[in-house]
Amino acid sequence: MKQSLGLLEVSGLALAICCADAMAKAASITLVGLEKTNGSGWTVIKITGDVASVQSAIITGTHLAEQQDGLVAHKVIARPGEGILSRAMAATPAPVSAPAAVSVPEPVPAPIEEPETEVVVEESAPEAAPEDGIISCNLCLDPACKRQKGEPRSLCLHSGKRG
C-alpha cells in the first residue's frame, strides 16, 4: 500500500501541537514532524499514512485550526513521487537524545518574617498609666507619652523631635 503525505500549516507552535494531537487521535497516521517556517511564527505539520487516513487527519486538523483562526494552508499529496516522501522525512532533524541528569540543589526556604503588629487602643478606653507599659500614642509608640489616639500631635512627647 502506498503512503501519502499530508501537510498542515498553522500559525503558532501551540496550535500546531494541538492540531497534531487531534490528527493523531482521529486517524491512523504517522507524525513525521513539526517544522518552523520563515515568517509570522508559522509551523508545518507533516504526516504520512494511507491516503484515506491522511485525508481524514488533515480535515480534522484543518477544522481545529480554523476554529482557532490559525489556519494558513493544507495539502494532501496522495501517492507522492519516489523522492518527495523520502525528502520530507529526511528534512526533519534527527531526534535529540535525552540530556544527562543534572543534579539541582534543593532551594533553601527563606526565613519567614513575622509581620509587625500594631497595638490599637480604642478611643473610648480609659487612659492607661505609663507604668503599665501600654502604648497610648500612635505617633511615637512611647509608653511614657500621655497623648491619646485622636488628640493633637502637639501633645506628643516627641512632637518637636520629628525630622
Image (cartoon, rainbow, N blue to C red):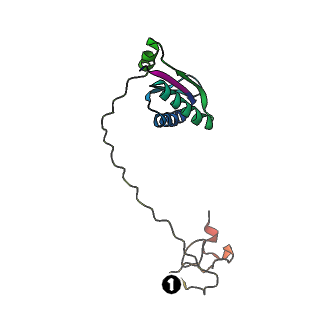
Predominant secondary structure, magenta span: strand
Q: Is residue 86 above or below residue 45?
A: above
Q: In the displayed image of the protein, which residue is found farthest to the bottom?
A: 126
> In the image shown, does 82 or 109 lie closer to the viewer?
82
Image quadrant containing the N terminus: top left
| Position of residue 57 in the picture relative to residue 161 (left or right) | left
Residue at far right of view: 152
Q: Quadrant of the C terminus?
A: bottom right
Q: Residue at x 57, y 29 (%)?
A: 10
Label 1 CA crowd tier, 10 Å (few <14, some 14–19, many 20+): few
In percent of the image, x 44 and y 12: which residue is there? 83
Asked which secondary structure carries label 1, the reply is: helix
- Horizontal relation, residue 82 to residue 105: left or right: right
| Type of amino acid under label 1 | Asp
Quarter of the figure with residue 90: top left
Q: Is 4 in the magenta?
A: yes
5 or 37, nearer to the observer: 5
Q: Which residue is mark 1?
A: 132
Query: Where does the image place residue 50, in percent across and percent down from the top left?
Result: 45, 25
Residue 24 belongs to the span the image colors magenta: no
Instruction: Between residue 67 and residue 143, name the one nearer to us.
Output: 67
Residue 151 is situated, as x and y percent measured from the top left of the image, at: 68, 78
141 vs 30, left or right, is: right
- Where residue 75 sits in the image (x, y, percent)? 56, 23
Relative depth, front residue between 120 and 28: 28
Q: Residue at x 30, y 42 (%)?
A: 103
Residue drawn at 60 percent across, 30 percent down:
71
Q: Which residues are magenta?
A: 2-8
Occupied quadrant, residue 11: top right
